[in-house]
Image: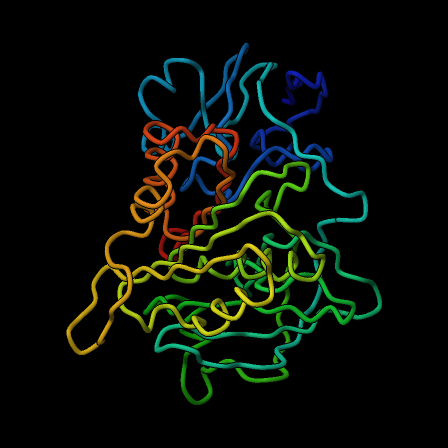
């Protein structure tokens, strides 16, 4: 059985087929609601059900506050209607030439930049331009049908060459292949099937507010794409990147991030290490990366924040920034990375 969903305040409507989630049906209808992980591990797709009934699944109880659940909020990537619905959600306008599609890709280069991070460069078909917003991600479609998501670390190019930063999850089906040895290791010229672009994590150009970019680990990747696009287009908004890791080696492209201070007027880079050891010789900032932001900018009411990395970092930043440091909730944009175990 299918159900109709009406979106407020736009009054757009779409149909959800049996078994579909609200988010998947909206995307299929060309209506882009905010989303990131699509598996219930973050709260980017949070929205309010004004009218109607639905199966919320188990994820909202783990992610959303009890008062949000009581007020009708849920995760649209998990919610399946059991009647017609009226929902409140902020729609995102996407360029008409950005279309999700499946395509083959060829591995062109593999560079291990840290003990557990591989930079993978993929060549997508050159016949048609691959259009996407800097900050979006693609999914690898594995032979068993499972999928693995990775953000593109470079803005679009005419060559359709994209860069991914892949962290090794020991025992992970896909990342063991990327980091394997011998016949099990990913090789140059290998063909992989991908689909994309996905996600609503990209710079909002309709604002001139100063920017806080917040990353942990390989959450640096989509922010790298956004910042390089800002450099290309001469975006002049003041911006600061806080990049956190446990040890200095986790910040695997520090030199590049420091270089951006010369390439982008008004840009600053602040690395933060949470578990520095004496042998590291670390003399920079220490502690949790989102707490460094709060120390430096106690009033975030006039800012936009783009956060990417481990869900615990993203969730902590969202809560602390909006509840205690004045950031409007609608000015917090996030992409929470999940591990292969989460996605299995």
What percent of the width, then of the height, locates residue 144?
Answer: 52, 61
Name the one closer to the observer, 237 or 19: 237
Residue drawn at point x = 36 percent, y = 46 percent: 293
Asked if residue 295 lies left or right of residue 178, the reply is left
Residue furthest right as drawn: 127
> Image height check: is 204 above or below 239?
above
State which quadrant residue 124 falls in: bottom right
User: Residue visible at 44% across and 25% down?
Assistant: 56
**Rendered position, 230 above or below 60:** below
Q: Is residue 6 left or right of residue 83?
A: right
**Relative to 272, is 80 above or below?**
above
Q: Residue at coordinates 39% horizontally, 30% vertically from top-left?
A: 322
Where's the C terminus, which quadrant?
bottom left
Q: Considering the image in quadrants, where does the N terminus appear?
A: top right
Residue 214: x %, y % from top left: 43, 50
| In the image, farthest residue toward the top | 51
On the image, the x and y values in percent for residue 30 come to: 73, 35
Q: Residue at x 41, y 13 (%)?
A: 71
Q: Is residue 90 above or below residue 95?
A: above
Between 340 and 296, the one nearer to me in the picture = 296
């Amino acid at each position: 059985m299918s159900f109709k969903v009406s979106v407020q305040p736009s009054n757009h409507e779409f149909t959800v087929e049996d078994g579909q989630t609200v988010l998947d049906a909206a995307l299929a209808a060309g209506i882009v609601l905010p989303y990131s992980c699509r598996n219930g591990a973050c709260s980017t797709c949070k929205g309010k059900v004004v009218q109607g009934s639905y199966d919320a699944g188990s994820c909202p109880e783990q992610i959303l506050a009890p008062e949000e659940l009581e007020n009708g909020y849920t995760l649209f990537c998990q919610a399946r209607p059991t009647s017609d619905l009226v929902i409140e959600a902020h729609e995102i306008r996407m360029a008409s030439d950005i279309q999700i599609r499946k395509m083959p890709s060829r591995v062109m280069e593999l560079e291990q930049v840290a003990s557990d991070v591989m930079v993978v460069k993929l060549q997508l078909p050159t016949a048609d331009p691959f259009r996407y917003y800097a900050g979006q991600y693609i999914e690898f479609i594995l032979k068993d049908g499972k999928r693995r998501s990775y953000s593109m670390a470079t803005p679009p190019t005419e060559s359709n060459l994209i860069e991914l930063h892949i962290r090794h999850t020991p025992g992970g089906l896909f990342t063991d292949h990327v980091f394997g040895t011998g016949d099990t290791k990913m090789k140059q010229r290998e063909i992989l099937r991908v689909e994309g672009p996905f996600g609503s994590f990209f710079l909002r150009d309709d604002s001139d507010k100063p920017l806080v970019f917040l990353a942990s680990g390989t959450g640096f990747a989509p922010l790298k794409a956004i910042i390089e696009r800002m450099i290309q287009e001469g975006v002049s908004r003041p911006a600061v990147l806080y990049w956190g890791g446990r040890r200095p080696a986790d910040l695997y492209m520090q030199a590049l991030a420091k270089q951006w201070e010369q390439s982008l007027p008004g840009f600053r880079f602040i690395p933060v290490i949470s578990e520095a050891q004496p042998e590291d010789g670390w003399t920079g900032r220490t502690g949790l990366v989102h707490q460094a932001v709060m120390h430096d900018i106690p009033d975030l009411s006039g800012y936009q924040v783009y956060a990417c990395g481990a869900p615990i970092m993203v969730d902590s930043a969202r809560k602390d920034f909006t509840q205690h440091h004045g950031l409007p909730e609608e000015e917090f944009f996030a992409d929470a990375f999940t591990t292969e175990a989460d996605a299995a």
